[in-house]
Image (tube, grey):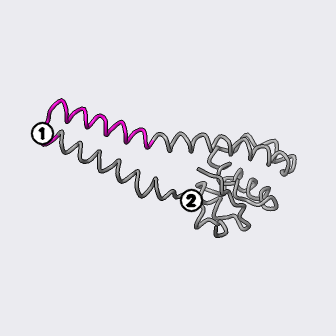
Amino acid sequence: MAEQNYGNHARFVPPFHWLTVPLVMIVLVWSTNQVVTGFSTVTLMQFFGALALTMTSFFARAFALKAQDRVIRVEERERMGRLLPDDLKARIGDLKVQQFVSLRFASDGELADLVRRTLAGEFAKPQDIKRAIKTWRADNDRV
């Protein structure tokens, strides 16, 4: 696996993104067309099934990411509790979940500076925190 950095850190799962999502969308579009062109109880039920399948696929991914973000927040709070100076430790609770998620990629050596800059409002978006990281700390276990 190539060294992780801002440009390649996003998790892309080919079977999910190239197969499952397109197939689910094809079924949804097809069933919608069936309802519109030949409305019946059967086509309506097919549409509802396709809609449920689409929503299940979306929520399965969303729920996994939400659980992962919560775990990251706990892990990063613990890491920050060990590494940050006292003035920043007192402000760990001021960080938002998405800021924890971005800061997890920062090396131990640059964490305090990035937390300080984050709390000062220097970064408008979580992606800005990631772009500011000089020494990337890989997270290969993400969902």
Q: Is residue 84 above or below residue 135?
A: above
The image's mark for residue 104 is: none
Tell which residue pokes out farthest to the left in this image: 38
Residue 76 horizontal side relative to residue 58, left or right: right
**Residue found 56% across the figure and 59% down from its top:** 10
Residue drawn where x is 59% and y is 58% of the image: 127
Q: Is residue 115 left or right of residue 7?
A: right
| Residue type, mark 1 in image | Gly
User: How far across and down, in percent of the image, does residue 8 sit?
Assistant: 58, 66
Magenta portion: prevailing SS class: helix
Occupied quadrant, residue 77: top right
Residue hosting label 1: 38
x and y percent of residue 2 in the render? 64, 70
Mark 1 neighbour class, 10 Å CA radius: few under 14, some 14 to 19, many 20 or more: few
Q: Which quarter of the rendered picture does the N terminus lie within?
A: bottom right
- The mark lying in front, picked from 1 and 2, is 1
User: How far apart are labels 1 and 2 at the CA level?
Assistant: 42 Å
What's drawn in magenta, residue-wise? 36-58
At label 2, which amino acid type do we have?
A: Ala
**Residue, disc 2:** 10
- Name the residue rendered at 34%, 51% in the picture: 23
Residue sitting nearer the eye, 5 or 33:
33
Give the SS element for disc 2: loop
